[in-house]
Image (cartoon, grey):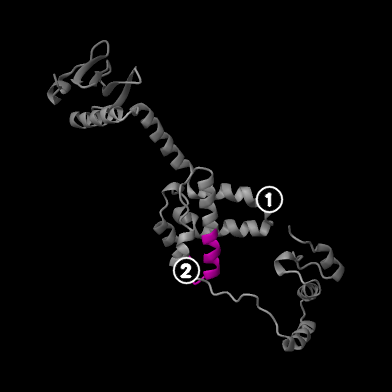
Amino acid sequence: MALTDLQIKRAKPREKAYTLNDGMGLSLLVEPGGGKGWRFRYRFAGKAKLISLGTYATVSLGEARLKRDEARRVVSIGSDPSEMRKEEKRLQTVAIKDTFEAIAREWHGTKNSRWSERYSGIIMRDFENDIFPFIGKRPIAEIKPMELLEVLRRIEKRCALEQLRKVRQRCGEVFRYAVITGRASYNPAPDLASALTPNKTNHFPHLKADELPNFLRGLSAYSGAITKLATKFLMLTGVRTQECDLPDGKISTLSKVFGMFRLKS
């Protein structure tokens, strides 16, 4: 016979725990201490199994029946409610642990050895200033394109368009890393490029032949020794500026400038 709320309220604790059956696997366990908890018994793969559906104090009789019916539906489609519950808890734990900030710092750590200390610091500082305060604590798998777009538009509003481009690309690398390592299923960053203001770049800026004399005269008159020597060095070697690690301002002789030069791999 199905239970009623009156029966449940009148059920007194005994020396030993006992159950009141509601039907179709649902029962109420009354404990010696007075606690009352819902239980659902079922069979899966030939084995008797039991799961808790909450306490009577927090789950009403009607709610317990709905939970029972859902569990029965899960069994009917060939799944185990107990295993599904474990998987849900695992996913909740993963969501808490795998935030955007946690994944970004992990990704940064895998790249750090390839970067100079200065460049590594710039990347992390951009994340800490522009991204982490807004979506850093969000589970990376739950971040939607519009959510990331709103964060990136904060940079766009400052008209920092080159920084916007770089930050969006780095966010994309973090999402890509999360996808590869099984913490996310989608990388929204590349698709957002068309929704943001592009940075107008001047590709391959150069001096024309008739501009060189004035440039060289100006360079000779320039007081910055390091910049002057480095510029002449770039002109003589033909390397790109990013391939030349310039020394700090304390180095002022040509030999030291050359001594600090190296090609990046």
| Residue drawn at x 65%, y 78% as measured from the top left | 205
189 or 161: nearer the viewer: 189
- Is residue 79 at all visible to an observer of this figure? yes
- Is residue 128 at all visible to an observer of this figure? no
| Residue drawn at x 55%, y 69% as measured from the top left | 162
Q: CA distance from mark 2 to mark 1?
A: 30 Å
Residue 159 disc label: none
Residue 232 x/y as whole percent: 80, 76
**First in sequence: mark 2 or mark 1?**
1
Main secondary structure type of the part rendered in magenta: helix
- 81 horizontally vs 235: left or right: left
> Image quarter for residue 258?
bottom right
Task: Specify the segment rendered in magenta.
Answer: 155-169
The reply to whether the magenta stretch includes residue 161 is yes
* 134 versus 212 height, above or below: above
Q: Residues within 10 Å of mark 1 (few under 14, many from 20)?
A: few
Residue 38 x/y as whole percent: 26, 24
Outermost residue, right side: 255
Quadrant of the image containing the N terminus: top left
Q: Which residue is mark 1?
A: 113
Question: Residue type at mark 2?
Answer: Glu
Q: Residues within 10 Å of mark 2 (few under 14, many from 20)?
A: some
The reply to whether the magenta stretch includes residue 199 is no
Residue 200 x/y as whole percent: 54, 75
- 87 horizontally vs 220: left or right: left
10 or 160: nearer the viewer: 160
Element assignment for label 2: helix
Q: Which residue is mark 2?
A: 156
